[in-house]
Image (spheres, grey):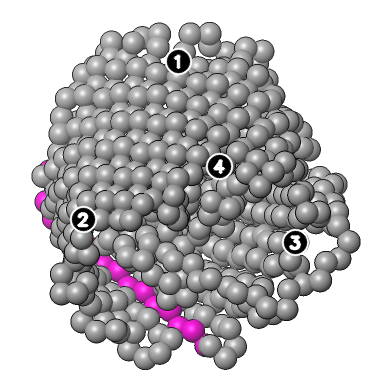
Amino acid sequence: MNRYLFSAASLLALAAGMSPAHAQSDEVTVLERIIVTANRTPTEDSKVGSKVEYISEEDIGATSLPAVIDYITRLPGVAISNAGGYGGTASVRVRGLGDRYVKTLYNGIDISDASGTQVQTPYEHLMIGGISGIEVLKGSQSTLYGSNAIAGVVDISTAPELVEGVRHTVEAEGGSFNTFRGRYGFAGASGGSRVSANISGVNTDGISAAAGQPENDPYRNITLDMNVEHRINDAFSVFGSVLHIDARADFDNSDGTDNLFNRNLVKMTGARAGFNLDLMDGRMKNTFSLQAFGIDRTVLPGNDLYKGRRHKFDYQGSFAVNDRVLLQYGADHERQGADITTAWSTLNRTHDLTGVWAQAIVEPVDDLVLTAGLRHDTHSEFGGHTTYRGTASYNFADTGTRLHASAGTGFRAPSLNELYGPFGGNPALRPETSLSFDVGVEQTLIDGLLTADVTYFNLAVDNLIDYFGAGYTQIAGTTRSQGVETSLTYAAADWLDLGGSYTYTDSRTPTGEQAARVPRHALTLFANARPAEKWTVSADLKYVSNSTDLDFATWPATTVKLQDHVLVNAKVAYQLTDATEVYVRGENLLNQRYQTVLNYGTPGIAAFAGIKSTF
């Protein structure tokens, strides 16, 4: 493994060193990043106590990878497991906890599947085309986001920053595994109106989902999205967004054997609309919205049908008492429904969840920002549950040091399948509950060119719901996850950006076993170089070590160690004109053979060529 790390590090060094030294700029202007998810209101990054990771439109353009999971897997504290290549079931783990503990929003729409065994998001169908930014908020966040936000929140946006005028974007790429993907995007702004829309598609022969088997499992995906906003006057504006995904994925058996007939047909459709009303010269802000989301899955060859539905109303308000105190408050109500028809069973049930919350953001003295929040939810089946949250951020302006900390509780309501499913449903289930905290220090050096952060996190989940014996039940004991996240970014020169992160995660089940599919060690490095006027070279490396999975071929299931691996990707781009870029990129350049899910393969070395034009 050391030789792989050496080779990969050499590749990154090559990407970083393709140019003679350039004089570094004498003056550097650092723009403060604005974070929305941490407090559900735009907040300067330096005032956020919670730990938030951010992927920008520039980050996406630098690598041109195809899927959302390709980007968030590079973030500290985030791990991805993928059952095969394109279209294989993809799971996101944040700080050692899986999808069912992560709330995912797409332009404000909750896109989790209410008909699943647990309510979670099918990340395998989220392609990157048109996405302009991703925020990952870590820690228990149920006070602001309700059920399922135990490990964190992933917020995906396709609304780019717009200036007056119209922008068209056309992208096309082809390469290994007979893969083609393309996108057309439109964005425009005029006066108080903004609109953006994208249509993107992927078609590939793929690889065999079952490791080492000869039959490939193709995948197809068409995604459409639109965002609109119109400001009628200084006090009133309306907005809306639409998402539609149509995907088809072949898949193999979990025992590692090929299957020529298995196929998932998936359609996901969501919409959100509402209005903003600002009163008292903008000191009092109000946002009302309605959203609906549905997912229809057909699993062949049995023609099993799974339909998940969600309808939600949301109100959020705020009042600026003065420059140092902001009061926030809100209420929401949602209904989830699952309609499942298979050869062996049926399920047609709904449940309701209603919540009210309040939070205060206070800056009692310069450079110190505190938040405190409380929420109460009422579930139509198990009754009420209360959560809380608090954060702190303090800047030592003279030294470039910032201390940040957060603590909060969370809950996960049982899914409809867990409550009423034909295979072990248990209406007596109570919600899973969590307590989490993190504390860290951020340091900037060299006039803001270098930023480093070290954060310790601790997260505990009680009342775990799991399938045991003949059905779902609450498991005694506590699921625990703790570790350290570190990150560093360095603008080494006006032509070179470097960065990296390392995460240590100790995640354990209630019996003390290492949690499956959670790597103990994860290291990421990246370099973006501009060696000549029209050339850009980027490369990234991810090293994953000490990950396990469960082998259910035996009873009880046995723990199997997965392969350590080093993944290296690189891209070389040439700017044909101010509007057009052509590029080649490679994935898994060390041709690593590894698994993130037992018995499921992953793509080997691959090469792609593409073009992107914005006009």
- Residue highlighted by disc 4: 615
How far across and down, in percent of the image, does residue 518 sit?
Answer: 54, 47
- Residue highlighted by disc 1: 263
Give me the C-alpha separation between circle 2 and circle 3.
Answer: 44 Å
Three-letter amino acid code of the residue under disc 3: Leu
Q: Earlier in the sequence, mark 2 or mark 3?
A: 2
- Residue highlighted by disc 2: 232
Magenta stretch bounds: 381-396
For the residues carrying marks 3 and 4, which lies nearer the camera in this image? 4
Q: Is residue 439 above or below residue 184?
A: below
Q: Is residue 529 above or below residue 263?
A: below
Give me the C-alpha separation between circle 4 and circle 1.
Answer: 39 Å
For the residues carrying marks 1 and 3, which lies nearer the camera in this image? 3
Give me the C-alpha separation between circle 2 and circle 4.
Answer: 28 Å
Give me the C-alpha separation between circle 1 and circle 2.
Answer: 47 Å
- Tell me, yes or no, whether the two marked residues, 2 and 3, touch with CB atoms within 8 Å: no
Which of the image's four quarters has the N terminus? top right
Three-letter amino acid code of the residue under disc 4: Phe
- Residue highlighted by disc 3: 496
Residue 331 location, quadrant: bottom left
Give me the C-alpha separation between circle 3 and circle 4.
Answer: 27 Å
- Residue at 63% x, 53% y: name it: 522
| Magenta stretch: includes residue 393 | yes
Compare residues 225 and 397 and report the one nearer the observer. 225
- Residue that sits furthest to the right in the current view: 20
